[in-house]
Amino acid sequence: MRKQIAAANWKMNLTYQQGEKLLDDILKAKHQLKDHQQVIFAVPFPYLIMANSVVANEKNFSVAAQNCYHKKSGAYTGEVAAEMLHSIGIRYCVIGHSERREYFSESNQDLADKLNLLLENGITPIFCCGEPLAIREAGTQNSYVEVQLKESLFHLGAEQVKGIIIAYEPIWAIGTGKTASSAQAQEMHAHLRKVLADQYGDAVANEVSILYGGSVKAANAAEIFGQPDVDGGLVGGASLLAEEFSTIIASLK
Ligand code: PGA
């Protein structure tokens, strides 16, 4: 079975102390993850080392950065390089979140460069894609998201693509309380898998975990995760509440 993943995206929320307590409260629930299940906490940079040590002895719990810079190193004040993340033992990194694409003007080419740097450093990218409302209303979401994938991913070889996690997050569903229906999620996930299959073959496409993101919560996780091409979720708001996120973890296939 493909890896099924509950990824928490804390975004720019919580103090260090609140973050420590939240991790503690979630781990107290003693989730027994199966071999194919994974929980990932994408926390702010200053909390990475703490979070990594908190989950160190928990089976299939990991920590992710929420971003990295698209250059290797150098005079880029305030930025964080993939190599730095690797040097503190971080194994996952979210890239291309729609908030970064919008507020920090990240282009598909920047994301291609980030993918290369993460893979060179042995870090699994969690690559986000997704369409804005106007595109969904025009009915052109499939080709829109396909271009995001092609321009950022398709220079990679099959072995590299197998090691990537994709998160489909329709922008109109992020933080709005308006989730895509499970049928809409399944339709797009199946489309993305077909795009991967056309380029890399079925075997590769069937190995890539595709997460859904956008207003996932305890009440809808089981139904969304139950879709055949949905392999878990990238969760913002509901990941900040221990009980909510625990239920989401328990909803993984
Ligand atoms: P949300 O955010 O769950 O608060 O909608 C999801 C995300 O942006 O990753």
Image: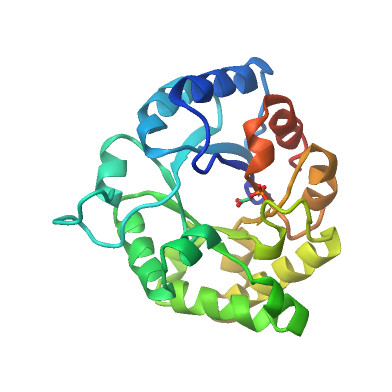
Q: Quadrant location of the C terminus?
A: top right
Question: Measured from the top left, where is residue 112 in percent x and y?
Answer: 38, 70
Q: Is residue 151 above or below residue 83?
A: below
Q: Foreground residue, 119 or 81?
A: 81
- Farthest residue toward the left? 75
Could you tell me if residue 57 is visible in this image?
no
Question: For residue 37, which quarter of the picture?
Answer: top right
Q: Foreground residue, 203 or 98?
A: 98
Q: How is the image coloured?
A: rainbow
Q: What residue is drawn where x is 85% and y is 64%?
A: 183
Question: Measured from the top left, where is residue 102 in percent x and y?
Answer: 50, 66
Q: Is residue 251 left or right of residue 234?
A: right
Q: What residue is drawn where x is 25% and y is 38%?
A: 87
Question: Measured from the top left, where is residue 115 in percent x and y?
Answer: 38, 62
Q: What residue is drawn where x is 61% and y is 55%?
A: 209
Could you tell me if residue 145 is visible in this image?
yes
Q: Is residue 162 above or below residue 3?
A: below
Q: How many marks?
A: 0
Question: For residue 104, which quarter of the picture?
Answer: bottom left
- Farthest residue toward the top? 28
Question: Measured from the top left, where is residue 200 in percent x and y?
Answer: 53, 75
Q: Is residue 56 left or right of residue 129?
A: left
